[in-house]
């Protein structure tokens, strides 16, 4: 899996919409959509906040740790 798929899977498992996740991170819902669909990637400095918002370890974003199952 790629980082976008991992973000999507973790977001769904956390019962968050793209809009809710975007609001928690202070980004647009378009940004979250692009991350999940491989159009762009979150910046490295945003990863800790992203992992926290999803309730997963940072490694799960890269497939090192398994994100929660949806």
Image (tube, helix red, strand yellow):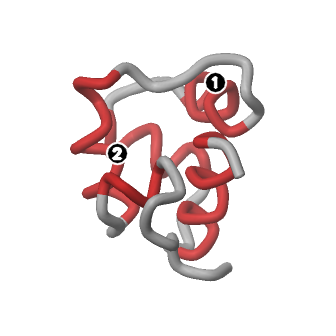
Horizontal arrangement in the rendering, residue 25 relative to residue 30 (left or right): left
- The residue sitting at 62% across, 18% down in the picture is 40
The answer to whether 12 is drawn above or below residue 28 in the figure is below
- The residue sitting at 24% across, 43% down in the picture is 49
Element on which disc 1 rests: helix
Horizontal arrangement in the rendering, residue 69 relative to residue 25 (left or right): right
Q: Relative to the observer, which residue lies in front, 3 or 50?
A: 3
From the image, state whether disc 2 or disc 1 is nearer to you.
Answer: 2
**Residue corresponding to mark 1:** 30
Q: x, y percentage for residue 37?
A: 76, 33
- The residue sitting at 68% across, 39% down in the picture is 36
Residue 19: quarter of image: top right
Q: Residue 41 carries which label?
A: none
Q: Which residue lies furthest to the bottom in this view?
A: 69
**Residue corresponding to mark 2:** 50
Element on which disc 2 rests: helix
Q: x, y percentage for residue 2?
A: 67, 43
Circle 2 crowding by C-alpha within 10 Å: few under 14, some 14–19, many from 20: many
The answer to whether 28 is drawn above or below residue 68 in the figure is above
Specify the quadrant that holds the C terminus: bottom right
Residue 31: quarter of image: top right
Mark sitting earlier along the chain (2/1): 1
């Amino acid at each position: 899996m790629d980082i976008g798929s991992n973000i999507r899977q973790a977001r769904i498992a956390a019962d968050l919409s793209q809009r809710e996740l975007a609001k928690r991170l202070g980004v647009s819902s378009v940004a979250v959509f692009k991350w999940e669909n491989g159009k762009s990637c979150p910046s490295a400095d945003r990863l800790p906040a992203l992992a926290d918002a999803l309730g997963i370890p940072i490694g799960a974003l890269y497939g090192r740790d398994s994100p929660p199952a949806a």
